[in-house]
């Protein structure tokens, strides 16, 4: 690039006196400076021909991060220029840049750059051309850092920087530091792949950085406090430094961190001096107005501030400060940096409290019009406007309850109600809120309060809401007749409001689940789920998922039960409802599913989660189910006596109320089988008597009696009891018990030497179990049945993969239990079984009686779940016991 015939002044020309000394020193590090390796590594990896832009608001440590990088890369000469507003004088700007460049040792003395520096350049296109040529001819590239580029507003100055960028001479590596995007062709550089940007997300301090800064400042916080402080400041370096200064004299660090904000004097001074003082009054007033909102959109900002150009102002503030940032790509909403926002809020409350109330009221109206009730109520409460709050509650309380926004709803109710309140609608809403929190007594009191003030001309919506609450109360206390009557009463009412209609459907459906019309119940719950999903009513969605999961379980669709329970738990944990009866119910169903899949450890884990999440809110039926599942899981894990005791305790404490027939049938069989396996005949008769009071005349009772007859040695009677169940003459309530019945038939057939019948019965059990993912009954079956399963592998057709899974799972569990159960003497006898010695010879070898060896062998067979010496050896070898 030629000079265009420009004549440069002679090298001995003296500088003009009015041009100040260039600011070309690399900044020094302050005390307690944190050297951060990550930003340095990122900058080191940038291609030398790429322009680097470090852009962030004041206090993010741009300058120090660049200085740290420069000092850690001394092999590259660096020309550093710290700009200020005086550098809009073009001559001064280029004097500073040339002075910084010519201080670099790698620039040869014969380089034209030295003569240009001494000559005080006349800035014109020819000068820029000469500068580019001189930089292009350098033997080694130099790094030029132009810090605080946001200070340049002069178009001619910026044009000169753009010229350097456009021609990118080989001897120059350009690095720019700015508080906001400079008026340079950044978009074109991005498109060409010639721009690397380091912005606030990369400059924010992480917890480790913050801890180091605090330690260097003489402040010692625990990890929890450090994390909280980083969250409060969002890793803003200036905020952390200012906090460290104050923390040196703080007695209660927890409280300081929790309250730390922009109204702290050092922070307030910094925010005013470095940010707000540089903005026009109208922009500061605008920021102060919108600071009452969390994430204002352009529309909300316009409504609150009264400015039609609010959207434009938000964009301008984002460019000029970077402390106002858009929260999405579409730039629909914005947020103010937390410390700046708390400063503006505190300033607003201190100087203009009346204006603050008016701003909150305007925000409440905007949110209400935009159908965002939680935000509307929060702002109405912040405005101290009880009339507005009550009006919003009449409109939005039920949807808020259905969404699960209890905290907002509770606070709003508390702000407008007192002991003398006669607002019937708000009393019913309070009852609904108490029911969602499993506070039955409080809900009953609020219902009585509403009834005492009931108007003669009650609106239909008021009548429907009362019926809904009456239905829920009846169901919670176990009054099925009253619940079904209330459900039928709601069906006769006209419900127009979508929220009340959806709530009525879910209440009707959950009540009807316990009645004879399951099909209607399923339809109502499915319809409520669809309506709730479209409206975002998460609590109703959760209740529908749990109701459908329960129905799937009662219908024997244990796979569907688990899937729906998984969805329910996922929704509950996402919304922060881990400690609720709703989430507990989901965990309980997941635990039962794991129990049936013969995964006792997982069943125990889920049962524990169910117990922890329910707390005091679970009803007796929930406690009973979880206790039975826990006990069965302990039993399956090998802790049999404690498992049976836990089941017995659960039934004694919580088995007095009415249960769903399917639930009772499934739980009763769990305890009954455990009692029989341990030879506890009295305990077995006790649970049978309990079940008879709940599910009289059911096939499940008949199945339990058939097991009892078999244990007493009455195989024929057992088989006669079983036959109507297998023929379908008497229905089994629990699908898992169908598998149990066919496995019992297989065992009885084997004992009667009817091997073909036994094979058919086993195949039927596999078919039913495969569809429902039920494995556990096979682990409880007689060893002969499991041996038949092993011998028939390869003949089960479509059920073959499931048969292999069952055998593998059962064998692994049996072997794990055997490792725990086999005594030292039994292990010694087991080690002799692979030999060809007879039991008499083994007894002689071990110097014990033959009867002792036979006793040990029987115990080994029982613990390994086999029926022969050969299979005992095979099982022991397969599982590593031998």
Image (spheres, rainbow, N blue to C red):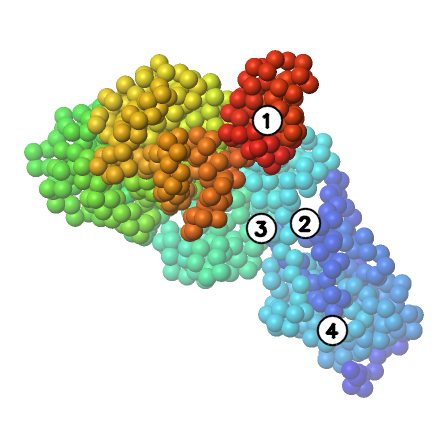
> How packed is label 1: few (under 14 Cα within 10 Å), some, or many (20 or more)?
some
Q: Is residue 111 above or below residue 455?
A: below
Residue nearest the viewer, comparing 6 with 220: 220
Q: Which mark is residue 61?
A: 2
Residue 633 at what x, y percent from top left?
Answer: 46, 28
Residue position for label 4? 168
Q: How far apart, in angstroms, are the residues tagged by discs 1 and 3? A: 71 Å
- Residue nearer the viewer, 504 or 369: 504
Residue lying furthest left: 456
Q: Nearer the viewer, mark 4 or mark 3?
A: 4
Of labels 1 and 3, earlier in sequence is: 3
Q: State how far apart marks 2 and 3 are (Cα).
A: 15 Å
The residue shown at (55%, 60%) is 319
Circle 3 sits in a helix, a strand or a loop, which is it? loop
Q: Is residue 471 left or right of residue 634?
A: left
Is the C-beta separation of discs 2 and 4 under 8 Å? no
Give the residue at x 58% y 50%.
275
Q: CA distance from mark 1 to mark 2?
A: 62 Å
Instruction: Give the vertical position of 129 relative to 682 (above or below).
Output: below
Q: Which residue is mark 1?
A: 819
The mark lying in front, picked from 1 and 2, is 1
SS of the residue under disc 1: helix
Characterize the local packing of mark 2: few (<14), some (14-19) or many (20 or more) Cα atoms within 10 angstroms.
Answer: some
- Labels 1 & 3 near each other (Cβ < 8 A): no
Report which residue position mark 3 lands on.
275
């Amino acid at each position: 690039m030629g000079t265009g015939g420009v004549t440069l002044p002679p090298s001995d020309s003296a500088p003009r006196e009015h041009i100040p000394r260039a600011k070309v020193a690399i900044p020094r590090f302050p005390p307690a400076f944190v050297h951060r390796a990550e930003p340095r590594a990122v900058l080191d990896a940038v291609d030398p021909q790429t322009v680097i832009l470090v852009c962030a608001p004041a206090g993010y440590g741009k300058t120090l991060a660049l200085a740290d990088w420069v000092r850690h890369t001394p092999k590259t000469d660096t020309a550093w220029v710290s700009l200020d507003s005086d550098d809009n004088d073009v001559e001064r700007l280029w004097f500073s840049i040339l002075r910084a460049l010519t201080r670099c040792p790698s620039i040869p003395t014969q380089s034209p750059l030295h003569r240009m520096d001494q000559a005080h350049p006349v800035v014109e296109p020819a000068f820029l051309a000469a500068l580019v040529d001189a930089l292009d001819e350098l033997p080694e590239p130099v790094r030029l850092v132009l810090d605080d580029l946001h200070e340049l507003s002069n178009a001619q100055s910026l044009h000169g920087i753009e010229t350097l960028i456009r021609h990118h001479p080989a001897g120059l590596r350009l690095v720019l530091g700015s508080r906001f995007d400079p008026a340079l062709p950044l978009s074109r550089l991005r498109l060409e792949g010639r721009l690397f940007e380091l912005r606030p997300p990369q400059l924010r301090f992480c917890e480790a950085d913050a801890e180091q800064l605090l330690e260097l400042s003489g402040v010692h916080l625990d990890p929890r406090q450090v994390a909280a402080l980083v969250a409060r400041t969002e890793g803003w370096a200036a905020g952390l430094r200012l906090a460290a200064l104050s923390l040196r004299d703080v007695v209660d660090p927890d409280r300081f961190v929790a309250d730390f904000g922009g109204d702290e004097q050092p922070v307030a001074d910094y925010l005013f001096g470095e940010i707000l003082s540089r903005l026009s009054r109208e922009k500061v007033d605008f920021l102060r107005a919108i600071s009452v909102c969390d994430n204002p959109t352009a529309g909300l900002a316009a409504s609150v501030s009264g400015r039609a150009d609010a959207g434009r102002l938000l964009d301008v503030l984002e460019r000029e400060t970077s402390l106002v940032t858009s929260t999405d790509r579409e730039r629909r909403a914005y947020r103010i940096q937390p410390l700046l926002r708390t400063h503006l809020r505190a300033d607003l409350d201190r100087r203009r409290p009346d204006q603050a109330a008016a701003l909150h009221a305007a925000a409440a109206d905007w949110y209400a019009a935009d159908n965002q009730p939680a935000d509307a109520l929060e702002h109405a409460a912040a405005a101290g406007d009880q009339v507005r709050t009550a009006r919003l509650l009449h409109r939005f309380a039920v949807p808020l309850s259905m969404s699960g926004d209890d905290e907002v709803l509770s606070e709003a109710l508390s702000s407008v109600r007192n002991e003398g309140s006669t607002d019937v609608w708000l009393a019913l809403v309070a009852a609904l809120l108490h029911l969602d929190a499993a506070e039955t007594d409080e809900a009953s009191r609020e219902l009585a309060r509403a009834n005492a003030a009931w108007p003669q001309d009650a609106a239909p919506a008021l009548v429907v809401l009362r019926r809904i609450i009456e239905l829920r109360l009846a169901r919670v206390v176990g009054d099925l007749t009253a619940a079904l009557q209330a459900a039928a009463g709601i069906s006769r009412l006209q419900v127009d409001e979508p929220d009340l209609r959806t709530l009525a459907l879910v209440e009707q459906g959950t009540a009807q689940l316990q009645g004879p019309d399951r099909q209607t119940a399923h339809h109502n719950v499915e319809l409520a789920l669809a309506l709730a999903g479209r409206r975002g009513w998460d609590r109703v969605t959760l209740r529908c998922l749990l109701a459908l999961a329960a129905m799937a379980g009662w219908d024997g669709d244990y796979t569907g039960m688990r899937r729906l329970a998984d969805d329910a738990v996922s929704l509950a944990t996402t919304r922060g409802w881990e400690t609720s009866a709703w989430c507990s119910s989901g965990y309980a169903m997941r635990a039962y599913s794991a129990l049936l899949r013969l995964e006792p450890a997982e069943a125990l884990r889920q049962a524990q989660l169910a117990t922890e999440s329910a707390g005091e809110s679970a009803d007796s039926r929930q406690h009973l189910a979880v206790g039975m599942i826990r006990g069965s899981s302990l039993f399956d894990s090998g802790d049999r006596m404690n498992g049976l005791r836990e089941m017995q305790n659960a039934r004694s404490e919580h088995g007095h109320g009415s249960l769903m027939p399917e639930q009772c049938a499934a739980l009763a069989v769990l305890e009954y089988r455990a009692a029989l396996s341990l030879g506890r005949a009295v305990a077995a008769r006790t649970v049978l008597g309990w079940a008879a009071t709940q599910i009289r005349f059911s096939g499940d009772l008949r199945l339990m009696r058939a097991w009892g007859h078999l244990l007493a040695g009455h195989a024929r009677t057992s088989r006669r009891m079983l036959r109507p169940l297998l023929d379908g003459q008497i229905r089994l309530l629990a699908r898992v018990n169908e598998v149990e019945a066919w496995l019992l038939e297989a065992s009885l057939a084997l004992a009667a030497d009817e091997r073909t019948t036994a094979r058919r019965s086993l195949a039927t059990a596999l078919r039913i179990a495969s569809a429902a993912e039920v494995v556990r009954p096979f682990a409880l079956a007689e060893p002969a049945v499991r041996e038949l399963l092993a011998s028939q592998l390869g003949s089960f057709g479509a059920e073959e993969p499931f048969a292999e899974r069952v055998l593998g799972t059962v064998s692994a569990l049996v072997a794990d239990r055997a490792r725990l159960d086999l005594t030292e003497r039994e292990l010694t006898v087991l080690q002799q079984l692979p030999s060809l010695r007879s039991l008499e010879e083994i007894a002689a070898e071990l110097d014990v009686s033959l009867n002792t060896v036979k006793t040990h062998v029987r115990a080994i067979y029982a613990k390994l779940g086999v029926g022969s010496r050969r299979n005992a050896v095979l099982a022991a070898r397969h599982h590593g016991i031998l």
